[in-house]
Amino acid sequence: MGTKTADEAGAETGAQATNDEQNVQAIEGEEAAGKAREEDLPEETASEETAPEGPSGVGQGAGAVVAAGLGIVSLTGSWVSTVASARETLVGQLQTSSQASVSKQIKEVYGDAWHATALWGGLFALAALIVGVVVLARPAFGAPGKPQAPWVKSVAWGGVALGIIGLFLAVLKYTDVLLGLPSAS
């Protein structure tokens, strides 16, 4: 029927026994090669997966964006400068009598407001300049061998440039060289 007795099962031909031995050796060889490949792979541990290689530069990137934002605000104006200007206009109106000369009224009502706007623009420009320079100087005091991302440098330089321009314009506005008050005569 298809069942073999113990004696018949043990009595295999020489060719079939040789094939079986070769198959076993081939399988053992494949297993050994697989183990060798596994040994070549670096072992990863939990500490290597979670430990960063150094500072990621996120803070420097954020600082660069802040510097550029402050530089833009110094050029376009801010809510703070608008409120300060409106306050100076109100104070000028309250302190100036209706009998005051026209030049005094212009100076008190509009001139001080213009100077307040220039002052706040200059403060934002100075902040942009300082933050941009700090971001650019940070790698000199950071991790050696870890270069700063090019986009961080570009944005920080943009913030520095906007800060310089904003500071220059603020000084020109405050000294009435740029858009000075009209004369009353």
Image (spheres, rainbow, N blue to C red):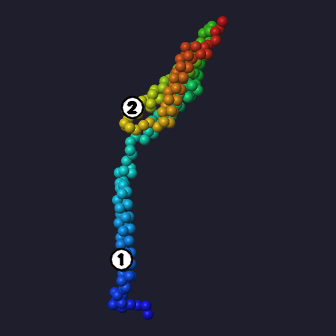
The residue lying furthest to the front in this view is 15
In this view of the protein, which residue sits in the foreground, 171 or 45?
A: 45
Work out whether 94 lies above or below 144.
above
Q: State the residue in front, 150 or 169.
A: 150
Q: Which mark is residue 21?
A: 1
Mark earlier in primary sequence (1, 2): 1
Q: Is residue 98 above or below residue 58?
A: above
Residue 14 location (% of width, % of height): 36, 83
Query: Regarding mark 2 in the picture, which secondary structure is present there?
Result: helix
Q: Quadrant of the N terminus?
A: bottom left
- Residue 168, given in percent of the width and then of the height, sits at 53, 19
- Amino acid type, label 2: Ala
Residue pictured at 37% horizontal, 75% vertical: 22
| 104 relative to 53, above or below | above
The front one of 164 and 76 is 164
Find residue 76 and report its image quarter: top right
Q: In which image quadrant can residue 5 be found?
A: bottom left
Q: Residue at x 45, y 28 (%)?
A: 133
Instruction: Say which residue appears at 37% left-offset and 85% top-offset.
Output: 13
Q: Position of residue 57 (x, y in %)?
A: 44, 39
Residue 97 can be seen in this image: no
Residue 17 in view: yes
Which amino acid type corresponds to the residue marked 1 in the rendered image? Answer: Glu
* 26 displayed left or right of 183: left
Q: Which residue bears the numbered disc 2?
A: 140
